[in-house]
Image (cartoon, helix red, strand yellow):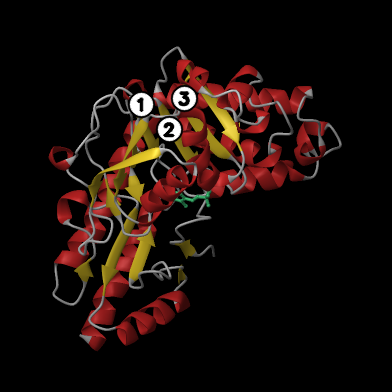
Amino acid sequence: MRAYNFSAGPAILPEEVLKEAQAELFDYQGTGMSLMEMSHRGKEYSAVHDETIANIKKLLNIPAGYSVLFMTGGASTQFALVPMNLLGAGQTADYTNSGAWASKAIQEAKLLGGKVNIAANCGKEIPTRVPSIDELKLTPGAAYLHITSNETISGAQWKVFPKHETLIADMSSDILSKPLDVSKFGLIYAGAQKNLGPAGVTLVIMKDELAERCPETVPTMFRYKTHIAENSLYNTVPTFPVYILCLVTRWLLAKGGLEGMQKQNAEKAAKLYAAIDGTGFYTGTAVKEYRSDMNVTFRLPSEALEDQFIAEASKLKLKSLKGHRSVGGIRASIYNAFPPAGVDVLISFMKEFEAKNG
Ligand SMILES: *Cc1c(COP(=O)(O)O)cnc(C)c1O
């Protein structure tokens, strides 16, 4: 039996995807080779590459004038590439600080010597949350506004996005979890290993015209322009992670796309939050209106009980429920691929655990 894997990332993948990858791993479509062993410019991989881009465009209904890029270095590299490419000398960038990931993005922008305005800061508040749109103190004429759509560690998520001429979002942990109006964004990036596929590829969706802002001094590999011009094939693209991402996008399309996913994700999250709220034993970590549908965070009355909870859950194949090492507590990550049945198993375990220890 497969475990119910609540890992925040690298995270669970759809069973169908793993099985298909397994079936094709040794001999890809009768070629006598694994796709992993083939040229990134050959016909087999090219078909996968182009289909993945087309599927992402279809799933998100991406308008003309945007590119879908496959990059490397994770979302953490994007923290630096965004200001390197888009924050011109003398300009200011607005950032919201909503927690651990947002503050890492801010740190990189500051390292590069750009002027950074913190438009709102609730990064250290408990219960955790993201800023409200009303509290943002925006700089007129800022190069861009950067937000973190879902704080994977604290379990807080933007439900309505602020409007900005150039809105940039780190969507590492909620991209493709629901429909999105891409036209409202200048650039979106996401490490694949949360809700998209395996670690090793970073998805970037950007408005092409923004890439023109890049200063001449930025090295070739660090320019969005390069990757747009070369269809993400300037150098060797991480072919196998893109292939798995391709299978995931096919799986999403077969399931009816992002509207169906959103409904299922909202149902899973609502059930789990209801179980948390239905008792005084468990306490949600995030402010209710900003609770994440992807990473459900909560506490028990003591750290000793939390350790016991994690250990007993693990015996029932409820795995990786430990909160991030920086904050403790419990975190149940319930991305697209996490089966609804696993949420039901967790909820029954929570009830039993409370009955015995509450
Ligand atoms: C995991 C995560 C990151 C870091 O991603 P890497 O791919 O490991 O660099 C950044 N932002 C968010 C919101 C994340 O969840």
Residue that mark 1 sits on: 185
Q: Residue at x 43, y 61 (%)?
A: 6
Q: Residue furthest top?
A: 64
- Describe residue 138's horizontal placement relative to residue 145 as left or right: left
Q: Residue at x 60, y 23 (%)?
A: 216
Mark 3 or mark 2: whose residue is earlier in sequence? 2
Considering the numbered disc 3 on the image, is that residue within a helix, a strand or a loop? strand
In the picture, the quarter occupied by the C terminus is bottom left
Residue 161 visible here: yes
Q: Nearer the viewer, residue 134 or 243?
A: 134
Q: Where does residue 214 sit, x and y in percent of width and height?
A: 53, 24
Q: Is residue 177 above or below residue 184?
A: below
**Given the image, on which type of amino acid does mark 1 rest?**
Phe
Residue 224 image label: none
Q: Residue at x 22, y 36 (%)?
A: 160
Considering the numbered disc 2 on the image, is that residue within a helix, a strand or a loop? strand
Q: Where does residue 196 sit, x and y in percent of width and height?
A: 50, 42
Compute the Cα span from label 1 to label 2.
7 Å
- Tags 1 and 2 in contact by the CB under 8 Å rule? yes
**Given the image, on which type of amino acid does mark 3 rest?**
Met
**Given the image, on which type of amino acid does mark 2 rest?**
Ile
Residue that mark 3 sits on: 206
Q: Residue furthest right?
A: 32
Residue that mark 2 sits on: 188
Q: Where does residue 280 sit, x and y in percent of width and height?
A: 13, 75
Quarter of image, res 217: top right
Mark 3 or mark 1: whose residue is earlier in sequence? 1
- Tags 3 and 2 in contact by the CB under 8 Å rule? yes
Residue 336 visible here: no
In the picture, the quarter occupied by the N terminus is bottom right
